[in-house]
Image: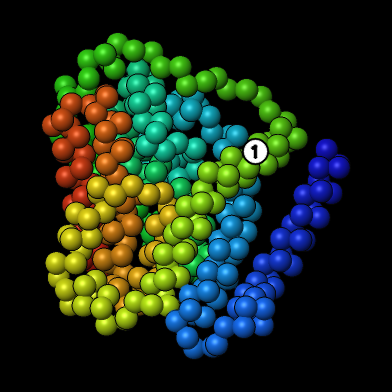
Amino acid sequence: MKNKLFALIGLLIIWFVGYSFLPAFSKFLTYDLMRLSPGTHWASSVEFFLYDYPKVMLLLAIVVFGIGIIRTFFTAQRTRQILAGKNEFVGNILAALLGVVTPFCSCSAVPLFIGFVTAGVPLGVTFSFLISAPMINEIALVLLFGLFGWKIALIYLCTGLTIAVVSGWVIGHLHMEKFVAEWVKHSIADIGNDKKLNWSDRIAAGWYAVIDIVSKVWIFVMLGIAVGAFIHGFVPENFLVAIMGKKAWWSVPLAVVIGIPLYSNAAGIIPIVQALLEKGAALGTVLAFMMSVIGLSLPEIIILRKVLKPKLIAVFVGVVGCGILIVGFLFNLIF
C-alpha cells in the first residue's frame, strides 16, 4: 500500500509539472520546432491542437482516476437499492445525481432498465437516471472545465440535471408503464453483486478506470480537437455567427434536429463545441447541439427499442428534446 501511495504522489507531481508547461510547450513546437509563421491559419490551428489535446488528456486522466475510486462505492445493485422505494420526486433527483457518478452509458440501458423495473424503481425515476448517465458524465464535465472553465461546466451540469429530473418526473406522471416490453416485467436482471473492497482495491480500480476509459476515448478526443482546430484556424467567424448566432432563432431547433441522428461521445463533440463558441456561435445553440448528440443519440434509441414500445420512446425523445430546446432558447436569451 505504501509503495502505491508513493507512486501515486510521484505521478501527481509529474502531472502538475507537465500541465503547467503546456502553453510554452505548444508554442515551442509550433513556432520554434515546426517554424510556422505566427498569425497564419495553419499556425493557429496547429497551436490550438498541440495545446488542447495534451491538456484534455491530462485532465481526463486525473479526473477519471478520482471518479474510478468513487464508483467503487456505487455498484449497480447498490444503486437500485438507493432508488427503490423513494418518494418519486426525491427519487428523480437521486437518480439524476447517481447518473453523474455511475459507470453506465446508453450501451448499458437494457440490463439497467430490467434491473430497475424488477427492483421496483418507478418508471420516471428510471428515466431520470438513463437521461443523466450518458449526458452528464465525468468525461463531459472535465472536458468542459478544461476547455471553458468552471462556469460553463457548472451551467452544463445544472441544466443537464434539470432536464433529467423534470423529464423523468413528466414521464412518470404520464403513467406509461404499459408501454414497457412485457418480457422486461418478468425478467430478473443480473447486474452484479456488491463486493467488499479495501483502499488498495479502490486505488487499483482508479488505475483500471483510467486505462479503460482513456484507451477508448483518446481517438475521439484527437479527432474532435482536430476538427475544432480546423474550425478555429480556417472557418470565418461571420459564417458561424450567421448560422448559429443569437439572431438566428431557428438555430436551436435546427441544432437539436441535426444532433439527434449523430453519434458521438463527449470526448468527440466538446472540442468541436469549443471551436464553435470561439467563432461566435451562441452558447444556447451549442449546448442544445451537444446535449442532443450525447443524450438523444440514434444508437441509444435503437438500444432502448429492445425494452420500450415505440410510443414510450417517442414520449422520451419528445420530452427530453423539449427540455433541450428550452435550455437552448433560455441561454441564448440570457447570455
Figure check: 36 above or below 80: below
Q: Which corner quadrant holds the C terminus?
A: bottom left
Residue 326 visible to the viewer: no
Color scheme of the displayed model: rainbow
Residue 190 % position (x, y):
46, 17
Question: Is residue 51 at all visible to an observer of this figure?
Answer: yes
> Label 1: how many residues lie within 10 Å, few (<14), some (14-19) or many (20+)?
some
Which amino acid type is marked by label 1?
Answer: Tyr
> Is residue 237 rendered to the left or right of residue 309?
right
Label 1 secondary element: helix
Looking at the picture, does residue 141 appear above or below residue 234? Answer: above
Q: Is residue 35 left or right of residue 4?
A: left
217 above or below 43? Answer: above
Residue linked to disc 1: 208
Position of residue 6 relative to residue 194, above or below, is: below
Q: Residue at x 20, y 42 (%)?
A: 317
Q: Residue at x 62, y 83 (%)?
A: 35
Q: Residue sitting at 57 percent across and 54 percent down?
A: 60
The spot of residue 89 in percent (x, y) is 30, 39
Q: Return the residue nearer the eye: 113 or 230.
A: 230
Where is residue 173? Give x, y as percent: 18, 35
Q: Quadrant of the N terminus?
A: top right
Residue at screen point 49% across, 38% down: 102
Q: Is residue 312 left or right of residue 214?
A: left
Q: Nearer the viewer, residue 297 or 65?
A: 297
